[in-house]
Amino acid sequence: MKRAGQVLGFIGIVIFVLFLSIPLLLTVLFAGGQAWMPVIVAGVLTVILWFGFAVFGVKRKEIVFGIPLALLAIGLLITSPSLYKLTKPVVQDDGVNLYEYAPFLEDTKAVSTDEPASFRLEGDLPVIDGATALYPLYASFAQAVYPEKDYDPYMSEVMSNRTGQAYESLINGEVDVIFVAGPSDAQKERARQAGKELELTPIGKEAFVFFVNEQNPVQGLSQQEIRGIYSGEITNWKDIGGKSAEIRAYQRPPDSGSQTALEAFMGVTPIMEAPTEQTADLMSGIIEDVADYRNYGGAIGYTFRFYSQSMIGNHDVRLLEIDGVEPTADNIRSGDYPIVSELYAVTAGTDNPNVAPFIDWILSEEGQEIVEKTGYVGIRE
């Protein structure tokens, strides 16, 4: 019996060495050793226990098999969230390499006017910040009128720290102008408490869009249906023309540009509280979550048209028609698309003398040419 137990122990060791080699390889290549650590530890303990039982000839099969397998099961249970993340598509930073749009780089995606700008900034350069989705736009403004030099997207006179931080920096007097969607009520209140008045100058227009996974058969929704979804009144796709599946309505954190746009769209209709796992910190994250094939049957999210189509370009999601109208530039321009957000240059009492003429130039024909060339819709008729 003892020899039989030793043979069993040897076989167990071989099986677990093979079993552990696969996750060890995966963790080295993809997860830096962290995602699989609990199951590796549990597996090693299992091997040790199994070998010990075999050497000492333990006869009770409940012990020989039960304890090691229980340890392995615990390890798998602990590590399962990490394993799930390991298999998901990864979007780094905010899903966009902003250096691709930085001004004055040789291969920049920042656009230029047909002719050199008639206005140039000199001396005290306005420090500008803003939403990730608008960085290609105001980086192009800078390329047209700022002095040519290196402008790091995260630490320079032309940077992007996302909407919430941009408003904080403006209110704190750390930047002169931010390029964003309109402020939330909380951001307006923080400005008031700081004794600052937010001055919003419309510089362009953009479609606020809702999207689903490409495999979702629903092609469009009405505004009333979307409000029903985000208020929690409509909970199954079968009630709005889809298959029977629970609706997973993703949201963004408060004070983000797209969440503020959702609040404006909902108006007096209360927005349901989103479960933590259905709140995406990054705007790219909400697209990634809906694109993930595990969620395709029920997920819906929202963002802005240019960001989703041109900056992220995830073909696993599909923008929905709203009231039968597609979110195209022509439909924004004509007013047919019903959910349009204005884009703003926002100031808060800066004393930089170059800010006012800079904004005036943005509103000029040259500045509006850049708005259109970037992919947004200008405010000039």
Image (spheres, rainbow, N blue to C red):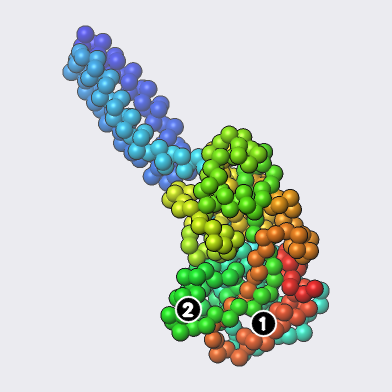
Instruction: Please indicate whether residue 20 sits to the left or right of residue 185 in the image.
Output: left
Return the disc, 1 or 2, that comes first in the chain's sequence: 2
Residue pictured at 33% horizontal, 34% vertical: 75
Return the x and y of residue 329 as percentages of the image width and height: 75, 61
Residue pictured at 67% horizontal, 58% vertical: 305
Q: Nearer the viewer, mark 1 or mark 2?
A: 2
Kind of residue at badge 2: Ala
Return the x and y of residue 178 as percentages of the image width and height: 58, 75
Report whether residue 73 is seen.
Answer: yes
Residue that badge 2 annotates: 191
Return the x and y of residue 304 as percentages of the image width and height: 64, 59
State the SS at label 1: helix
Residue that badge 1 annotates: 359
Quadrant where the C terminus lies?
A: bottom right
Residue pictured at 54% horizontal, 80% vertical: 198
**Mark 2 Cα within 10 Å, few/some/many (few <14, many 20+)?**
some
Return the x and y of residue 164 as percentages of the image width and height: 50, 68
Q: Is residue 31 above or below residue 2?
A: below
Report whether residue 89 is seen.
Answer: no
